[in-house]
Image (cartoon, rainbow, N blue to C red):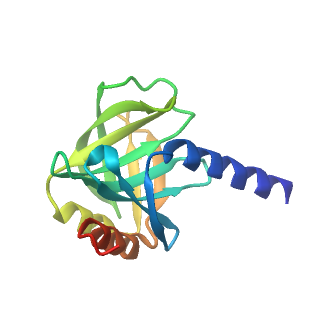
């Protein structure tokens, strides 16, 4: 029980640290629906996994593009603004991408931007996403359960229905 409380507190702390400026729009299928004023009021979904990785999928209204971002306090060696070649898989289908390193309130992470709107649909239609570093090592593997429904709500948010 103590371990569960510690994990819950750590997850809450990680989420609070990363979402202080985000506007809450609800909670669906394990994902927070939020709006980010820093990205032109772009809407996003965010969740925290057991390893305390924070994952965001959203829309950058200023850049007219989508993104997925992953934060984890354990990734201390990521440099702000540096490009990192990565590979990720959606249910085994492989994609190469460039992630941009950043630090959000001293929590390192990486963001992949994309302009193909079908990519969000591809994420929603899959069950797992695995991200690999340039050496081919698994950085993270996440279950995408509930993502499709949460992304529907994020679309409603973006269309100003929420």
Residue 100 placement, left or right of 17: left
Is residue 125 at all visible to an observer of this figure? no
Is residue 65 at all visible to an observer of this figure? yes
Q: Residue at x 31, y 68 (%)?
A: 157
Give residue 10's position: percent from left, percent from top: 68, 47
Give residue 133's position: percent from left, percent from top: 38, 36
Q: Residue at x 37, y 46 (%)?
A: 69
Q: Image quarter for residue 146?
A: bottom left
75 and 54: which is toward the camera: 54
> Is 69 drawn above or below residue 135 in the view shown?
below
* Quadrant that contains the N terminus: bottom right
> Is 10 drawn above or below residue 27 in the view shown?
above
Give residue 50's position: percent from left, percent from top: 62, 54
Give residue 72's position: percent from left, percent from top: 52, 39
> Is 52 drawn above or below residue 103 in the view shown?
below
Q: Residue at x 60, y 48 (%)?
A: 51
């Amino acid at each position: 029980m103590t371990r569960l409380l510690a994990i819950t507190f750590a997850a809450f702390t990680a989420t609070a640290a990363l979402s202080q400026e985000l506007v809450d729009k609800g909670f669906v299928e394990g994902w927070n629906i939020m709006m980010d004023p820093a990205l032109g009021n772009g809407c996003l979904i965010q969740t925290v996994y057991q390893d305390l990785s924070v994952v965001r999928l959203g829309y950058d209204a200023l850049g007219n593009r989508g993104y997925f971002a992953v934060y984890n306090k354990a990734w201390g060696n990521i440099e702000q603004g540096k490009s990192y070649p990565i590979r990720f898989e959606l249910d085994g289908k492989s994609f190469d991408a460039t992630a941009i390193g950043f630090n959000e309130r001293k929590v390192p992470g990486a963001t992949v931007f994309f302009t193909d709107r079908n990519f969000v649909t591809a994420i929603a239609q899959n069950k797992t996403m695995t991200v690999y570093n340039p050496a081919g090592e698994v950085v993270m593997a996440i279950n995408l359960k509930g993502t499709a429904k949460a992304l529907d709500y994020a679309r409603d948010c973006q269309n100003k229905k929420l």
